[in-house]
Amino acid sequence: MTTAHEYAQTNADRFRELYKELVRIPSISTLPEHAGDVQRAAEWLAEQMTLAGFQSAEVIKMPEGRHPLVLGEWNGAGPDAPTVLIYCHYDVQPAVVEDGWLTPPFEPVEKDGRIYARGTTDSKLHVSAQLRACESLLQTGGAPVNLKLILEGEEESGSENINAFVEQHGDRLRADVCIISDGTILDETQPSLVYALRGIATMELHVEGPSQDLHSGHFGGSVHNPLQALAEIIAKLHDENGTVTVPGFYDDVLPEDPDERAELVQANMWTEREWNNVARAPQPWGERDYNIHERVGLRPTLEINGLTGGFTGPGFKTVLPQKAMAKISCRLVAKQNPTRIYELIRDYIAQITPPTVKATLIPLEPGAEAAVLGRHTRAMAAAADAYEKGWGKRPIFERAGGSIPITYTFQKVADEVVIIGFGYKTGQAHGPNENAHVHSLHRGIDTAIHFLQAIGGQG
Amino acid sequence: MTTAHEYAQTNADRFRELYKELVRIPSISTLPEHAGDVQRAAEWLAEQMTLAGFQSAEVIKMPEGRHPLVLGEWNGAGPDAPTVLIYCHYDVQPAVVEDGWLTPPFEPVEKDGRIYARGTTDSKLHVSAQLRACESLLQTGGAPVNLKLILEGEEESGSENINAFVEQHGDRLRADVCIISDGTILDETQPSLVYALRGIATMELHVEGPSQDLHSGHFGGSVHNPLQALAEIIAKLHDENGTVTVPGFYDDVLPEDPDERAELVQANMWTEREWNNVARAPQPWGERDYNIHERVGLRPTLEINGLTGGFTGPGFKTVLPQKAMAKISCRLVAKQNPTRIYELIRDYIAQITPPTVKATLIPLEPGAEAAVLGRHTRAMAAAADAYEKGWGKRPIFERAGGSIPITYTFQKVADEVVIIGFGYKTGQAHGPNENAHVHSLHRGIDTAIHFLQAIGGQG
């Protein structure tokens, strides 16, 4: 009888083409004009689940203007077998050629062993690998675990609905183990297991000055320029060491564990290398008392993600603008709460804003707390073994700087949560020329099969 | 025989319609896609000059990609009569409905005694008033002075060519008196004469950090965010009193004349009223030791005219961007030189930029020094008399905050230079809903006729 691994090998080319087919659907959840594409991707995925052998596959409608979940279920392993809930997201970030793409963002182009397109690494790689791992098991005699495959369409636009959905359907989704399949491992020669993720809070800062745009000659020197005022406010949000100056910002950051920091030195070696390969800023920046891995994984941030105001087209317009805007996000750690962080920043900005302008801070998305998983659970051990088989090397532990807000919610319905990513940090998630290695798809499928087999007692 | 003033009255409706016809041509000199419109406006004006009675009217081509001058000449007063050179500009600033226009920017709409459209006040009001004043004289027996009417098409986009043109054609343009017809008077009940204008220097500040846009989760905390770095640099360009901190910035600002400052108190009363009517920021801002009129007219500024970087569309993108940009302009006074000011800012920014980012300051346009005219010349006296007849009230003296870079150049070819503006400060030059009073056109024509008559000894 064919094994799941043999099935995956035989179907490798077909799996790759189906992965590209999914990538071609521009399922951008942040832009309303792409809502139809998100819907189309959901329907395509439900159809693929059915073809893969799931007993049911449902496109679950969310409120008007939002994007569906896709839920596939297979309970053929019986009531005594463990249940594994697998989560991925199928929506993607916006992408336009002008951001520096060398190829069209939604036409996958294969070159030198990589596939380039928006979503190749974040996160259609994971959707494809997990779905095809399930198919390989289901088409070769069935899986040793009951399967629930849940795919989200709003991860890049605030995950407005999945948290409530999971909490409301806790019985249906209850699982022994939850796999969150997203994110990256250190390198193609070094898999890694993420045991902590940062949370996130997003907001917009609006600064308003005069009642309308003014001529900078007629009024310049007598009106506090909102662009200048915005810059002055932003400049006060960090001190010279890169530490956030907002009072109370670090109150819920827990004291560090010296053993953990000693272990993180290994991950930092990789992080520094990645920094030099990918970030390549003139110099690293940030809090002196923490290495780069810790700055990104262990410490919270306050980041400016966008600035706009006045005239920025070609040529010059001597305008003294009415308003200016900054998009701000915080990456959160430990017990920091997104609402509380928003309130602290709002209050601090109110305090430092001079009476010559009006500043308003608006919270944008519900945000998420950080998620810390155990490093020594059964699922972690199974994941480490699966990676060792899939990638040929034992993974090391790391903290991730990004946010997978759903982790926190899944901890409520599953006994153990593990994060399994197949992307690489060179994959340019959210940036131009996003890409994934072709081998990541195939190693990912293998690793996912090994993991499910291990949880099912076939490890 | 019909007098020039009678002719102007008889032709008032026709003059107004021709003014609207000119306003309808979107002669935006800063946007390359409007080059054809600028050309069309120039040709229309040359034709109108010929119809008005000028002996010659020429559209003078400028280098590829730039915009023509229009020069009309009438030497019928003879070699012993004085020669008056009249300058206006016929190009306009960009305007799009999205900036807050209540009516289409290039379709003049008359409402409550005002005409709304881009260019109505800056500066097609002046082009129209001066051209129709000339016509009124030329069609009623001729003018008492020789006339040279020069119209520029690049005033809003750096005046790249007119300075060289005027210097090269000094003999052709030589005049006893030069009228620069542009700008505003204090109020419809109070005309004013500008005797000083600020110069200008424009530049772009580019801040670059990492080699590409990054995921703020993967790198946030370890890379100096270029948006934050830009804000930090901008925040260091002023102190808490609103004074520019760039070393040497004030070196060429002359010590103030106490008599002049005492006189400016009268103009400040108007400026404060205008500030409360138009600017309406939460509070005035700027250098404590100067009143609002002085902050705008007597003191130099460093203004941020535009800021851009990162993701600023709807929704949120957790990007740590590669770069950020600010448009900066300085209004200059006294002996401040635009090139020197650029160099001082460039050197200061180089000094305060941290090693974690790269900052580049690029000069944008040639800029212009401030222009100070005499307050007690023959032309000023003639202008004061002309305003008194046209507006029914003696003008007061004021310093203007804006820049008319050409003033400096005309001081080289004319014995006296006078600035005669017919707009009001509520006219929203450069802003949305730009407008001019209908009476400003007709009073402007009358005032311009009186001025030319006075210079020609018929005052």
Image (cartoon, coloured by chain):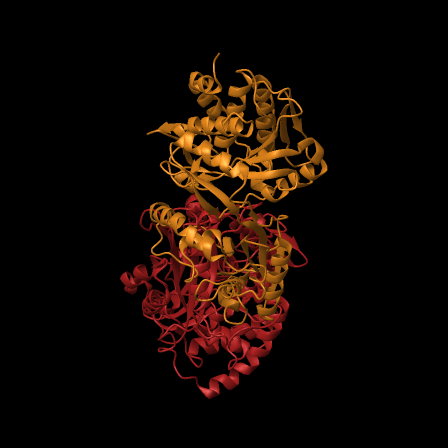
Chain colours: A orange, B red
Q: Is residue A269 above or below residue A141?
A: below
As drawn, A17 above or below B343: above
* Picture quadrant where residue B13 is located: bottom right
> Which residue sits furthest bottom?
B258
Going by the image, does A12 lie left or right of A167? left
Residue at figure coordinates x 49%, y 35% from the top left: A383
Q: Give the quarter of the image for residue B196.
A: bottom left
Q: x, y (%) of residue B119?
A: 52, 55
* Horizontal and vertical percent position of residue B105: 57, 50
Asked if A361 appears above or below A10 in the picture, the reply is: below
User: Do we see residue A121 in this rendering?
Assistant: no
At 69% from the left and 37% from the top, the residue drawn is: A165
Residue B28 seen in the current view: yes
Along the viewing direction, whichever of B177 and B192 lies nearer the viewer: B192
Looking at the image, which residue is at 62% across and 42% down?
Answer: A411
Camera-nearest residue between B62 and B303? B303
The x, y position of residue A94, in whole percent, is 51, 39
Position in image of residue A37 (x %, y %): 57, 30
Residue that lies at the very extreme toward the top in this rendered image: A1
Q: How many marks?
A: 0
Location of the N terminus of chain B (image quadrant): bottom right
